[in-house]
Amino acid sequence: MALAIGNGRSQDVLAAAERTGDLFASREASSYNTAECEFSRYLEGRLEKLLRGDLNRLALLRHYHQQPDCLAAPVPPRGVDRSALRIPVVEEMLVRVLVFLQTGMPGGPIAQEPSNGRIVERQLHTTRFPHILIERIDTFEPGSGAPLETEWILRRTQNQQVATRISRVLDLANLSLEFFRASR
């Protein structure tokens, strides 16, 4: 693709070396069945709501280490045939959300506490979005320390709608002050 410059000559928009990664790579269509198509659209909608500020918390994924054929995920909407959802496909969708959000930086400090006869550790991870955190919760057997489950929860740390309203009020106040100064 070329970009036309004022003199009529064109210039490559992106050099071939810059067109790498998931955004530009050719890929095959996902092999989703009907229920997985519906679940993928539902998941995309939940992620958009979180990013917009319409949702403050999304329990995204829980992996059971002792039961590899078991997975906890957001409950799909009514009408989605849950029995048709394949665990590896759903898990891949959910992991892609985490990969999309995460920065690749190490997580924060690990906070440990006993809970219901188990050891629970919590760790916060930053995301590309300053108002969203990934909370990783690991549960272990006491004594042996064997991992039982790992859960990933997406959390907003500010309410975007409230912050936007406050910003608008401040903008209006500043505009009024500038108008007052200009009219003097």
Image (tube, helix red, strand yellow):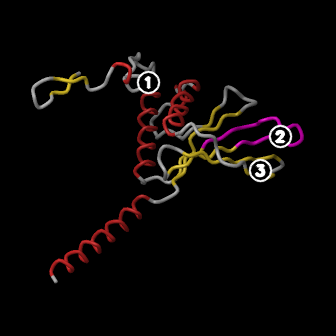
Q: Which class describes the residues within 10 Å of circle 3: few (<14), some (14-19), or many (20+)?
A: some
Helix, strand or loop under label 1: loop
- Crowd class of label 2 (few under 14; some 14 to 19; many from 20; radius 10 Å): some
Question: CA separation, marks 1 and 2?
Answer: 39 Å
Q: Nearer the viewer, residue 177 or 167?
A: 177
Q: Which residue is mark 1?
A: 21
Magenta stretch: give its range: 138-152
Question: Where is 79 relative to 172, above or below?
Answer: above
- Residue sitting at 61 percent across and 42 percent down? 152
Classify 10 Å Cα crowding around label 1: few (below 14), some (14-19), many (20 and above): few
Q: Which residue is mark 3?
A: 112
Dominant SS in magenta? strand
Q: Quick one: label 1 or label 2, which is nearer the N terminus?
A: 1
| Mark closest to the chain's N terminus, 2 or 3 | 3
In the image, is 120 to the left or to the right of 156? right
Residue 139 coordinates in the image, percent (x, y): 75, 42
Residue at the (63%, 48%) spot, across then down: 124
Q: Amino acid at mark 3?
A: Gln
Task: Name the foreground residue: 56 vs 98.
Answer: 98
- Amino acid type shown at disc 2: Glu
Q: Residue furthest right?
A: 143
Name the residue: 32% across, 22% down. Answer: 15
According to the picture, the residue beneath numbered tag 2 turns out to be 141
